[in-house]
Image: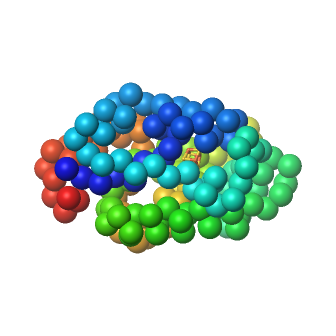
Amino acid sequence: MAKILVSGCLLGFPCRYDGKSCPVAEIRELAKKHTLIPVCPEQQGGLPTPRLPSEIIGEKVINREGTDVSEQYHRGAEIALQTAKLNDIHLAVLKAKSPSCGKGKVYDGTFSGTLIPGNGVTVSLLEEEGLTVFSEQELTELRSLLDKGEGIL
Ligand code: SF4
């Protein structure tokens, strides 16, 4: 059995910027064998739900009206990291493309739906601290790691 940090929206919690969720049945299924610990760095960092969408621009996170929300994003990332440390978690499944939870690709800061290479703020911090992060689009790779069980239990 592994302990896995999971984006709350992937588990069906309505924590997204638009007040909705984006549940993935296959991720919820993981709870049968593993312990899933939900986080939502944007809510936990102090942002309301619903909230304006934000994108990463350089070193900052800016919402659609131009307000700098970097502080809340970094606070949320730190809370996700502390949650992982407190529970001795080394593995995370986080929501693709989010400015917090996105891994590998994020929106380019123009609010035009254009993706560029990069990580969300929380993914950057978790990876810096040694966690292995998957998106919901990488469940085959996640399952393969869980089957091996190496270094994550
Ligand atoms: Fe989902 Fe992460 Fe956005 Fe929260 S911050 S709504 S968990 S993608």
Q: Could you tell me which residue is drawn at 50 percent across and 52 percent down?
A: 39
Say whether residue 26 is left or right of residue 79: left
In the rendered view, tell whether residue 22 sits above or below residue 62: above
Say whether residue 119 is left or right of residue 148: right
Can residue 109 be seen here? The reply is no
Q: Could you tell me which residue is drawn at 69 percent across and 63 percent down?
A: 72
User: For the image shown, how many numbered marks are present on the structure?
Assistant: 0
In the rendered view, tell whether residue 24 sits above or below residue 38: above
Question: Picture coordinates of residue 79 (x, y %)?
Answer: 53, 65
Say whether residue 85 is left or right of residue 73: left
Q: Could you tell me which residue is drawn at 71 percent across and 44 percent down?
A: 49
Colour convention of the picture: rainbow
Of residue 18 and residue 106, the one placed in the foreground of this image is 18
Question: Picture coordinates of residue 67 (x, y %)?
Answer: 83, 57
In the rendered view, tell whether residue 28 sits above or below residue 72: above
Q: Dividing the picture into quarters, in which one does residue 139 lie? A: top left
Question: Picture coordinates of residue 30 (x, y %)?
Answer: 29, 38
Question: Picture coordinates of residue 71 (x, y %)?
Answer: 70, 67
